[in-house]
Image (cartoon, helix red, strand yellow):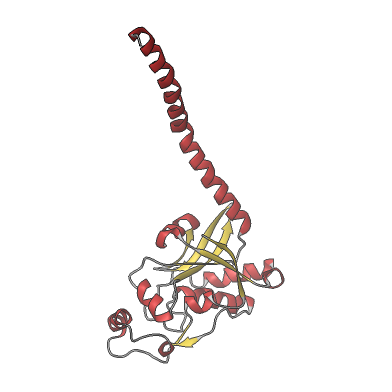
Amino acid sequence: MKKSLITPIIISILIPGLMIIGVIRFIGPLLGNETKHIYTTDLYNLVEDGDIIFQTSKSSQSKAIQIATNSKYSHLGIIYKIEGDFFVYEAVQPVKLTPFTEWVEQGEKGHFVIKRLKNADEILTSDVKNKMKTEGEKYRGKDYDLYFEWSDDRIYCSELVWKIYKNAAGVEIGELQRLDEFNLNDKIVKQKMKERFGDNIPENEIVISPSSMFESKNLITIYSK
């Protein structure tokens, strides 16, 4: 084939290809943003005030909690819609309101499960939801309870959610247990307990675990990612 013919053919092949690449580069980020926007919008329309969200925390104690309670999930909080956005009210250090996207990012692989009270339409009226937020404010700013004590001086994640539901809505989610009912014999759990309590483990301390709340028959799953 003559050179004079090769050049136009190559150009005719390259130009459309370059145009396609350019279009992809231009609209790719836009499509990504749109996908994120649609996802957020759909989820926002799905969730309601008072929904409970679970995740596997990246904290140093997460693995010990998972082993001791025989559960994948080690952290939870309550979802609140506020001024067009939604947040998770959680007991970390300290108890605080965390933007939803930030909360998701702090969990393993961005995975989370959202659950709701089975008869939420009947029990979680607007007045009750307001009472729940008021009840939750009692704990805002309090230190995280590393010792899992059943008091209001300091508070841990599942304790916060359990007490808000119990005190404001009259609902117990999950069964209270004694510390000695969990698997405390595993090496990782023993090490964490030793760090916290030394040789004086409060085996009779009343606790509520994320696993007990996750498995509660009072809840139904409405979303999992």
Residue at the right extreme, as displayed: 122
Please give the name of the residue rendered at 31% of the width and 85% of the height, measured from the top-left corner.
197
Residue at the front extreme, as displayed: 1
Nearer the observer, 184 or 165: 184
Please give the name of the residue rendered at 37% of the width and 65% of the height, measured from the top-left corner.
58
> So how many labels did they put on this image?
0
Please tell me in which quadrant of the rendered image residue 64 appears: bottom left
Is residue 185 at least partly visible in the picture?
Answer: yes
Across and down, in percent, residue 173 comes to: 57, 78
Is residue 106 at least partly visible in the picture?
Answer: no
Please give the name of the residue rendered at 49% of the width and 42% of the height, measured from the top-left corner.
32
Nearer the observer, 96 or 38: 38
Nearer the observer, 155 or 206: 206
Please tell me in which quadrant of the rendered image residue 144 appears: bottom left
Across and down, in percent, residue 216 comes to: 57, 78
Please give the name of the residue rendered at 62% of the width and 77% of the height, measured from the top-left corner.
218
Tell me: 73 left or right of 198. right
Is the residue 146 above or below the residue 105 in the image? below
Nearer the observer, 130 or 65: 65
Could you tell me which quadrant the N terminus lies in?
Answer: top left
Tell me: 26 left or right of 174. left
Across and down, in percent, residue 184 comes to: 36, 86
Is the residue 13 above or below the residue 201 in the image? above
Please tell me in which quadrant of the rendered image residue 223 appears: bottom right
Tell me: 225 left or right of 109. right
Across and down, in percent, residue 191 comes to: 28, 81
Is the residue 181 above or below the residue 22 in the image? below
